[in-house]
Amino acid sequence: MERPFFILGPSIRELARLVKPEVCPNAEPAAKAEKTSEWAKDLLHFKPSEKQTEVLDIDAKYLILCCNRQWGKTTTIALKALHRAITIPDQTIVIISRTKLQAGILIDRACTYAVRLGHKIRRALGHQFSLQLPNGSKIFAVPHTTDTSVGNTANVLIVDEAALVKDQVYFSVSPFVARTHGAIWLMSTPRRPAGFFHNIWTNGDQRWHRIFSTVKDCPDIDPDFLEMQKKIDEIKYRQDFDCEFLQPANRLFTEEMIDNMTKF
């Protein structure tokens, strides 16, 4: 009786390595990551203006906003910070303002939106004004003192109402992002033509992405209210709503006067 004849061929493991998966020629490319503005509109029903959309979607490492009162700086940056915290694990986002309560408003806004997305509010350990997310990301405020720099690092540093933050405090907290190669987001309504916020806005450093907006970009603000504010204090009005860097009216010397004196 003849023995059966077997043809030796490649093993199953070799065949698996050689076979390439078939690709459908009509397959669509993978969808791009959703923009922050689209995320805010789709999930939180926030309808940003054109410039607010730019703020939400720009991926600038250094971002500075010079905008009028009631422009929506707090809400827009709160959404930008929350989106980053949710989509990138283990982010540390630190907020500083002239008062810790002011910084807490931004965190409270982020917490409100986090609840709408189904997240439970948890505080970051040791921080009264804070939000801790399940993916390890956290947002918290630090006091307006030079002592806040001890031991803190961040992936994003947010300076709220930066024109009111003292220079020495800013220079104390800005190294938070030095080792992480992190981002700095400054936002404020202008005040006097001095200080780090004014200097960064005017120094022409191309590493900063600048966004400027005045009351003319905010048609929802009551024009009757604006007219009343302008009559009460025109200098303050021009700071708050026309976004001009001006000395207060009660100053003995203006910047222009000092410049003229130093020319001789």
Image (spheres, grey):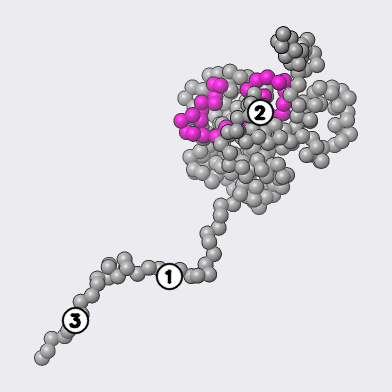
Mark 2 touches mark 3? (CB < 8 Å): no
Which residue is labeled 3 in the image?
6
The residue type indicated by label 2 comes to: Trp
Label 2 sits on residue: 201
Disc 3, SS = loop
Q: In which quarter of the image is residue 69?
A: top right
Q: Nearer the viewer, residue 128 or 85?
A: 85
In the rendered structure, which amino acid carries the disc numbered 3?
Answer: Phe
Pointer 1 or 2: first along the chain = 1
Could you tell me residue 39's position as x and y percent? 63, 50
The amino acid type of the residue labelled 1 equals Glu
Per the rendered image, the range of residues in magenta is 171-198
Residue 197 in the image: above or below residue 1: above
| Percent of width and height locating residue 232 | 87, 23
Q: What residue sits right under mark 1 in the picture?
A: 22
Mark 1 to mark 3 CA distance (whole Å) = 30 Å
Quadrant in which the N terminus appears: bottom left
Secondary structure found at label 1: loop
User: Circle 1: is it few (<14), some (14-19), or many (20+) Cα within 10 Å?
Assistant: few
* Outermost residue toward the bottom in this view: 1
Q: Distance between the residues labelled 1 and 2?
A: 55 Å
Q: Is residue 69 left or right of residue 120?
A: right
User: Magenta span has 264?
Assistant: no
Which of the two residues, 106 or 248, is positioned nearer the viewer here?
Answer: 248
234 horizontally vs 158: left or right = right
Distance from Cα at disc 2 to Cα at disc 3:
81 Å
Where is residue 43? Give x, y as percent: 64, 51
Contact, mark 1 vs mark 3 (Cβ under 8 Å): no
